[in-house]
Image (cartoon, rainbow, N blue to C red):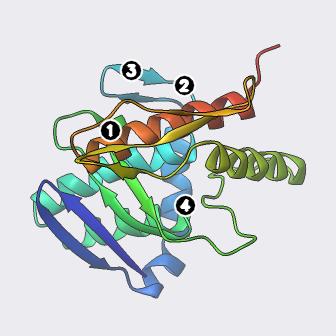
Amino acid sequence: MILKAVIEDEIYTLNVPEIILQQAGDVFHKMDQDMEQGWQMSREWVQRPTAIQRCQIVADKLLTALEKDNHKLGMLMAGYILTKLPNLDTVEIDIHGEIQNTAFTFLEPAPDAPVGSPVQVDAGAEESDDTEAREQAERDVSRVFKVGKSYRFSVFDHASGEWCDSPAFASEAEAKRQRLKAFQMRYSALRHPAP
């Protein structure tokens, strides 16, 4: 499987051998167990990282591996990300210590396939809820689009029944980062609705 990692203006194409994905299950499980205890993401402590947040954490480790030319660790970290986020095309890794700004770009999903998959599922009902929440969040937050020389995305407001445009962003990368935050907020709200 191939993962493209964007670091500043450089693109790394990581071709992760299938055998790594098959043999690293125990390592990935241990990584999940570690992150289930909570994780410091930049200035924020995250009690229970979501699938996206876990992949942002691991992308930060991927960045370190690439910087240190640690090919083996890099393949392992890329493999984790690919197994947790189906249809992933590109990860744009934040280099300023803001892990939550790492952004993911997905290939077009298959008609009935969710864009992402849950990292941990306790039961079939939870898997179904997680998938529904992820799919609804994907429907409620549009892809980034260009308006003149700037970039925006839209979020559907269920209360008014209208789409609300984001502020204009100078770069597509920044728009994607902000879109990811909006997606995470909508996904979290759907998974844990206010009483």
In this view, the mark in front (2 or 4): 4
Task: Determine crowd level at label 3: few under 14, some 14-19, many 20+ residues with C-alpha closer than 10 A.
Answer: few
Residue 71 picture location, percent across and down: 20, 72
The amino acid type found where label 3 is placed reads: Glu
Q: Which one is nearer the viewer's eye here, 50 or 176?
A: 176
The amino acid type found where label 2 is placed reads: Gln
The amino acid type found where label 1 is placed reads: Asn
Instruction: Give the residue pinned by disc 4.
Output: 84
Q: CA distance from mark 1 to mark 4?
A: 18 Å
Instruction: Give the residue pinned by disc 2.
Output: 47
Along the polypeptide, which appears first: circle 4 or circle 3? 3
Q: Which one is nearer the viewer's eye here, 59 or 108?
A: 108
Instruction: Give the residue pinned by disc 1.
Output: 101
Label 4 SS: helix
Q: Is residue 70 among what the camera can see? A: no
**Label annotation for residue 176:** none
Q: Are marks 1 and 3 in contact (CB under 8 Å)?
A: no
Label 3 SS: strand
The amino acid type found where label 4 is placed reads: Lys
